[in-house]
Image (tube, helix red, strand yellow):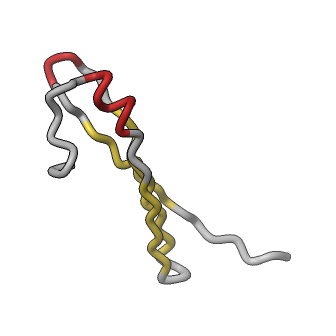
Amino acid sequence: MSDRHVYEYALLRVVPRVERGECVNAGVLVYCRARSYVGVRTHLDEARLLALDPRVDLPGV
């Protein structure tokens, strides 16, 4: 029988304007308590974010 472990994840999202309800995925966080593992990968599609809000503070994000 193979060792199976529960991995949990959370999406990292940027919400440039809350009132419009739009968001852009910017990364993922993965966690496994049994293996003492935490990993994260990020990637921001700046063009997509600017399409949602041209005034977004990119360096701040």
Q: Specify the quadrant of the image occupied by residue 3.
A: bottom right
At x 46%, y 56%, the residue is 9
The image shows residue 18, relative to residue 59, as above or below, that is above
Q: Where residue 61 sits: x, y (%)?
A: 21, 49
At x 19%, y 51%, the residue is 59
Q: Where residue 42 sits: x, y (%)?
A: 42, 56
In the picture provided, is 49 more to the left or to the right than 35? Answer: left
Q: Specify the quadrant of the image occupied by residue 15.
A: top left
At x 41%, y 40%, the residue is 45
Q: Where residue 57 sits: x, y (%)?
A: 15, 41
Q: How many marks?
A: 0
Residue found farthest to the top: 20
At x 14%, y 28%, the residue is 55
The image shows residue 2, relative to residue 14, as above or below, that is below
Residue found farthest to the bottom: 36
The image shows residue 18, relative to residue 41, as above or below, that is above
Q: Nearer the viewer, residue 38 or 20?
A: 20
In the picture provided, is 23 more to the left or to the right than 9? Answer: left
The image shows residue 39, relative to residue 15, as above or below, that is below
In the picture provided, is 3 more to the left or to the right than 24? Answer: right
The quadrant of the rendering that contains the N terminus is bottom right
